[in-house]
Every structure is written in C-alpha cells, then in structure tokens.
Image: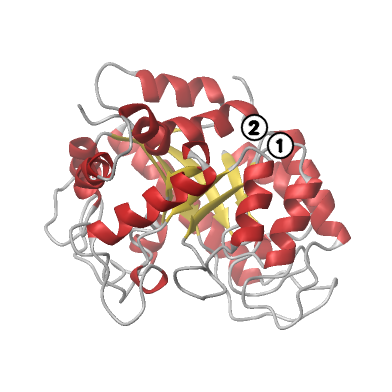
Amino acid sequence: MATPPVVDLHEDISFYYASMGAGQPLGGYGEDLEGRQADLPKYSRANVRIVFAAVFPESNVYQGGEGYPTPSSSRLLLLDQVKTYYALSSIHGVEIIESWRSAQEVLEAPRWRLGLLLHLEGADALADILDLELLHRLGFRSLGLTWNHDNRWAASCKTRRDYGLTQSGEDLVKKAAELGVIIDLAHASDKTVADAASASPKPVIVSHANFRWKVDSPRNVGEEAVEAVVSKGGVIGYSLISTLITRGRHPTLHDVASQMAEFVEVYGHRHLAIGTDYHGLLDIRPPTGLESIDRLPRLLEALADAGLSDRQIEAIAYGNIARVMREVLPES
C-alpha cells in the first residue's frame, strides 16, 4: 500500500537545537543531513504530517511535596525552546497545530505538509494552573505531567513513593480537558497514570514508551497502565528507545513490528501509535533498520508482513491519534 500519513507522538526538535545537535549532525532543518534522525526532507519521504514537538525545560533543582518550587531556569528554557518552533514555522511554513480543524487539514492535504503540535514535557515549569492558560495561548496542545522527577502535580516513573496525582494535579488535568490540551502520561508513575485516566473526562495518551512485560523498566507501561489508557479511548505511542525494547541485545525493526503486532492481538489496533523520541535518544542508538524517520515506511511494511491489515496499519500510523485529537483539541 502507499505510505499513509504518519503522526509521531514525540520528538525533541527544540532540544536538538538547544543541545547543539544532541550528538547528531547540526544544521538547518530544511537540509537532508546524513546521520540526523529527522528533518524536513526525511519527514516528507516518510509522509510524516504531524509531530508532537516537545519542549523539555529540564532542571536539576527539585524538591518533594505539594509546595514544589518552580525552577526559574525551567521557565526560561521553555520560552527559548518555543521560539525554535515558531522559527521553523516562519522559515519553512510549518503549521503550529492548535485545533482539530488545522490537524485535519494537514492530514488530508493532497500534497505533503507538516504540522507541529506543541507539547510540554514535564509540568515542572508551571507555577500554577493559570500558567497552563498562558501556554495554551502560546499554542501548546499537549502536556506531560512529569519527566523523571516528582513534582507538585504528580509522581513520576522514578518516584520513591508513588503518590499519584496530587489535588493540584487533578485540577490541572481537568483544566487541560477544559482548554483542549491532551494529557500525556509518558514518564508518569503507575498511580499517576491510573489517577489521571480516572480524573480526565477526555482520552489520555502515553506518547513514547514500551511494554514492561518485555523490558521491566519503570519507564515502560505495565498491563494496568495500558488498561487505564485503553479504558479512556487513549493511545500508547510505541517508542524507539532501544533499551526499553529489548535487554541483552540491540533491537531490530523486526522486534519493533513483532511487539506492536502482539499488542494489537491483545488490546486491539485502536490504542497503538508511534512515538519515536527522535532527537531525544542521545547516546542510545535506535533499533537497527529505524535509524531515522524516513525509515518508518519500512516499519509499516513489517507490520503488514506480521499480519496487520491496511486499515489497522493506517490506524496506528495516524488514525488512532487523530481520533484523540478530534475528541480533545478545540474544534477550530
């Protein structure tokens, strides 16, 4: 079949520039650089239409409890990284996705177009719920409650004491639904996933993770977390973080397709998507055969070889997350 539109639920494009290439060749995003995991020409070849574009205001200043401080460095990093995406929009005509209508137009365009859906990876930079309204006005339409550190809103996957959502976190989840912001539970603790899925009136996602029954890591989702996301009509974005896919050997494209097909067999095809984490893998090599985003058509072919139908593959490539965007994002 022809390559369907693809939506990637997680890439760290702004971090790539903030870190001077994140270990990859550095250059303008309109260049097709060999050895770079993603850029505009590669998106075009793979028919990638929408990328959830992460802003990662990571800070090493963290303390526990409801009264977490907001690291000032996080807020400065956030603004600097937002500029990267608006620069891409200005220079290359990339669309900032702010509504279901704009997402639909990009997905259905007769010729290739790219849209970026702005995502905050970790809510540490938010001092209070009003900050989410400000970010919404800046164009953010996806919010990750945590990165690898606990914060005032929720416990992370690396927590020592899994307290789940705090009361403030529950209020934040409900405000996100009201504004039309997707809640992303990648990097969240098991209880946070369960609490957020329960608290949200809308579908939730895990943008980039793998399966704990394959690799026992707190960054991966276990059966209960998957069931919580599935129960809300949400999706799991399968990541290309090799250390979360296999242990003891480097994974291949075949491993990825096999694990995705197994997930479909158990949970159905309506709750799986792709969340590569390109530009954020740092010193972790992607699976063999999936070294860059333009290799994704090979993955879709491998899913067909594993027995998935064209309809199922299209759902994984873009249809499932399109359903979530339609249900959560503002209409226009």
Give the numbered dot on residue 202. Answer: 1
Category of crowding for the residue at label 1, using alpha-carbon neighbours closer than 10 angstroms: few (below 14), some (14–19), many (at least 20)? many
Three-letter code for the amino acid on which mark 2 is drawn: Val
Circle 1/circle 2 CB separation < 8 Å:
yes
Q: Amino acid at mark 1?
A: Lys
Dividing the picture into quarters, in which one does residue 319 lie? top left
Residue 65 is situated, as x and y percent measured from the top left of the image, at 83, 76
* Residue 240 visible from this viewpoint: yes
Looking at the image, which residue is at 38% across and 44% down?
Answer: 87
Q: Which mark is residue 194?
A: none
Left or right: where does residue 169 sit relative to residue 318?
A: right
Please tell me whether residue 100 is drawn above or below residue 225 in the rendered image: above
Outermost residue, left direction? Answer: 34
Q: Closer to the camera, 221 or 328?
A: 221
Residue pushed farthest right?
Answer: 167
Q: Residues within 10 Å of mark 2 (few under 14, many from 20)?
A: many
Q: Earlier in the sequence, mark 1 or mark 2?
A: 1
In front: mark 1 or mark 2?
1
Q: Which residue is pictured at 85% across the width and 58% down the height? A: 168
Q: Position of residue 75 (x, y in %)?
A: 62, 62
Q: Nearer the viewer, residue 249 or 297?
A: 249
Could you say where residue 301 lies in the image, as x and y percent from the top left? Answer: 21, 41
Which mark, residue 328? 2
What number of labels is visible? 2
What residue is at 18 percent from the left and 37 percent from the top?
A: 45
At x 21%, y 36%, the residue is 44
